[in-house]
Amino acid sequence: MVKVLLHGCGGRMGKMITGLAKDDPEIKIVAGVDVLGGQCDEYPVYTALADVKEEADVVVDFAVAAAMDGLMDYCAEKNLPVVLCTTGLSEAQEAKVDELAKKVAVLKSANMSLGVNVILKLLADATKALADNGYDIEIVEKHHNQKVDAPSGTALAMADAINAAADGKYEYVYDRSERRAKRPENEIGISSLRGGNLAGIHEVYYIGTDEIVEVRHTANSRAIFGKGAISAAKFLAGKPAGRYSMADVIG
């Protein structure tokens, strides 16, 4: 059984993972950390990492960027693998993730959904087949009206997967309102829609002459991200130091 320390246990995703873990015999959350504290019937909750007494095999993080430096210091000190799910890290924090990976196993992904990460692999194949055959590529992402960043990290991960498969020939365009010119071949348009309580929809269009190929992922619940994080924790426990991704989890 994999023993997990849940960082950010009081947030929406922390509570989601707590519920999912109860039904999984292969994983056990032994403690949680949340700066706001709180109560949990499943495990003790601490307001600071330094107060944690329980032994864990891996940390699963769904907190906020401001808490990442302390978490990474803790994982380095305790030699604990960590699944980093928090987004919006600064350049300095991203560099610190790379340094941490020299000491412990680190898995970081823009999206923890297994389905999304399968699609990232599919996009690489589609791009190699279509990009040099006259197909324009556009990405549309749709999220709830409380999401603060645009475009989403997942949309950017999709664009990066496409660009890597095309040897980096594309530029990303987020706004064409000031331009009066035909569409260049070497761009990916990325559009963001916000409204209601959408959990997340991502659509990639390969638009050719007389043909459109569409790749789409719909998140009906945030539970898919929790399930992915649990799968990542099982995978990462016991792994040697290094950078890992959800591509390693799905094989």
Image (spheres, grey):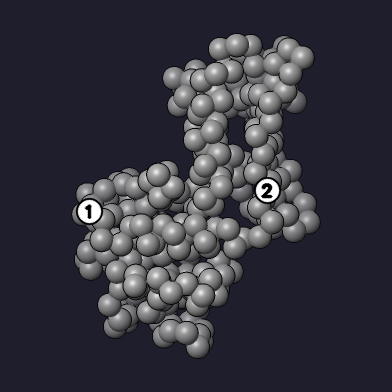
**Mark 1 / mark 2, whichever is N-terminal:** 2
Q: Where is residue 57 in the image (x, y as percent from the top left)?
A: 29, 69
Q: Which residue is drawn at 47% across and 24% down?
A: 165
Quarter the C terminus occupies? top left
Pointer 2 local density, CA inside 10 Å: few below 14, some 14–19, many at least 20: some
Q: Where is residue 77 in the image (x, y as percent from the top left)?
A: 21, 66
Q: Name the image quarter holding residue 146.
A: bottom right
Numbered tag placed on residue 218 in the rendering: 2
Above or below, 50 against 198 in this view is below
Pointer 1 local density, CA inside 10 Å: few below 14, some 14–19, many at least 20: some
Q: Name the image quarter holding residue 182.
A: top right
- Residue type, mark 1 in image: Pro
- Residue type, mark 2 in image: Thr
According to the image, label 1 marks what residue?
Answer: 240
Q: Which residue is drawn at 47% across and 84% down?
A: 42
Q: Position of residue 228 (x, y in %)?
A: 49, 57
Note whether residue 243 is visible: yes
Above or below, 213 against 233 in this view is above
